[in-house]
């Protein structure tokens, strides 16, 4: 029998899994990475009756830091923490920012997923009171949770369309207008993507001396080494006095644009953003990776739910023999990916492992 864990306990377990997984990937230990996933699943945690809700909420509430479009893992967050503490966040570290914005939102989402298909809710009175207190200190809480409520409604109706484009001669009528019928499904995805962009919380930094090619095709460890070289010591002396303009000369923070747009996200995965623009017109890219990354962007929470999304576009991730990706000497199959997804591995971490930036913004013509 599997013990029933609280949502806070499950949050801690999923967070520990992702922290450990990142550490193994950072050090290039893929076997250790696989082992930590195996141990997590073998522990029975994923069989807990509350796990599906906890995993979904963890994905939705995720807080990210990026620099020059690349997702910063734990070591990257530690590296810029002094810069953030002294200049951008009025004395708060990266850990403080995540704590303020992540868990209260997570707790709220756990409560509100109860009406969805992912399970039932049983939050303890203590957790409810803790969540209420924590949300008071979170200035972004109301904005994010309102967007989440909209997202849940849209997600529940993702595969529902108006039947005005069908004939009425049977219980399974023929489609009168294929284009309009397909566009109805696509419109649901577009609305969901727009709602998702309002939930994504990203603290975006830019290092003036770096460009995207500097990080491209680099391992997490190599990226940290490069970043370290371009973020010199900001302290003037042993008393921790800050050098004049030490921070502004190297790092800037975009405080006005926290949205992660789907087109920028797709471009960051090596998929031309034009594919999203075509998709919006019900012109379907012949690329399974496009639909998988779209599912990741939407934070569809489990391999079963992603499979349903893929099936609607004519693809599958459930074949035991289908190859997914190659990293170094390791061949990764979709069955491996499904295990990572269902264990609760952060999609940003998976993409970090594959070498993809969080986003690449569109360059506007001057």
Image (cartoon, rainbow, N blue to C red):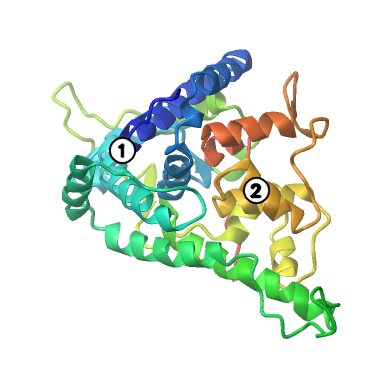
Residue 259 image point, x, y percent: 46, 60
| Residue 231 visible somewhere in the drawing | yes
Location of residue 224 with respect to 210 vertically, above or below: above
Give yes or no for contact between labels 2 and 1 (Cβ–Cβ under 8 Å).
no
Location of residue 216 with respect to 40 vertically, above or below: below
Residue 366 image point, x, y percent: 59, 71
The numbered disc on residue 232 is none
Residue 145 image point, x, y percent: 34, 60
Nearest the eye: 167 or 276: 167
User: Mark 1 sits on what residue?
Assistant: 94
Residue 255 image point, x, y percent: 35, 58
Give me the C-alpha separation between circle 2 and circle 1: 31 Å
| Residue 365 visible somewhere in the drawing | no
Nearest the eye: 140 or 92: 140
Residue under the point 57% across and 52% down: 297
Location of residue 239 with respect to 65 vertically, above or below: above
Identity of the residue furthest to the left in this view: 239
Q: Give the total of numbered labels.
A: 2
Q: Secondary structure at mark 2?
A: helix
Residue under the point 62% across and 14% down: 31
The quarter of the picture where the N terminus appears is top left
Residue under the point 52% across and 67% down: 154
Mark 2 burial class by Cα count in 10 Å: few <14, some 14-19, many 20+: many
Mark 1 burial class by Cα count in 10 Å: few <14, some 14-19, many 20+: many
The image quarter containing residue 35 is top right
* Position of residue 366 in the picture relative to residue 61 (left or right): right
Q: Nearer the viewer, mark 2 or mark 1?
A: 2
User: Mark 2 sits on what residue?
Assistant: 306
* Position of residue 360 in the picture relative to residue 175 (left or right): left
Q: Earlier in the sequence, mark 2 or mark 1?
A: 1
The image quarter containing residue 220 is top right
Q: Secondary structure at mark 1?
A: helix
């Amino acid at each position: 029998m599997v013990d029933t864990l609280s949502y806070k306990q499950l949050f801690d377990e999923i967070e520990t899994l992702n922290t450990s997984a990142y550490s193994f990937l950072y050090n290039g230990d893929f076997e250790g990475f696989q082992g930590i996933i195996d141990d997590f699943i073998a522990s029975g945690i994923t069989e807990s009756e509350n796990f599906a809700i906890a995993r979904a909420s963890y994905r939705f509430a995720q807080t990210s830091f990026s620099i020059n479009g690349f997702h910063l893992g734990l070591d990257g967050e530690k590296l810029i923490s002094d810069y953030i503490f002294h200049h951008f966040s009025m004395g708060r570290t990266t850990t403080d920012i995540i704590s303020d914005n992540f868990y209260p939102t997570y707790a709220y989402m756990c409560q509100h997923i109860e009406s969805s298909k992912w399970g039932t809710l049983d939050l303890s009175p203590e957790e409810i009171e803790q969540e209420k207190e924590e949300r008071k200190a979170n200035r972004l809480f109301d904005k994010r949770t309102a967007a989440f409520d909209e997202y849940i409604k849209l997600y529940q109706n993702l595969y529902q369309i108006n039947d005005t484009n069908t004939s009425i001669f049977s219980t399974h009528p023929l489609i009168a207008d294929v284009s309009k019928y397909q566009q109805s499904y696509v419109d649901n995805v577009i609305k969901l993507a727009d709602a998702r962009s309002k939930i994504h919380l990203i603290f975006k930094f830019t290092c003036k001396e770096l460009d995207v090619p500097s990080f491209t095709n680099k391992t997490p460890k190599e990226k940290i080494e490069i970043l370290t070289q371009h973020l010199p010591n900001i302290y003037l002396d042993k008393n921790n006095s800050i050098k004049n303009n030490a921070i502004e000369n190297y790092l800037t923070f975009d405080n006005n644009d926290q949205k992660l747009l789907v087109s920028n996200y797709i471009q960051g995965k090596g998929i031309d953003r034009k594919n999203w623009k075509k998709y919006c017109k019900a012109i379907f890219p012949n690329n399974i990776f496009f639909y998988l990354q779209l599912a990741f962007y939407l934070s569809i929470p489990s391999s079963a739910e992603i499979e349903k999304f893929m099936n609607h576009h004519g693809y599958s991730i459930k074949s035991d023999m289908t190859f997914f990706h190659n990293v170094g000497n390791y061949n990764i199959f979709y069955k491996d990916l499904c295990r990572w997804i269902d264990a609760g591995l952060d999609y940003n971490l998976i993409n970090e492992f594959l070498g993809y930036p969080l986003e690449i913004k569109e360059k506007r013509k001057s």
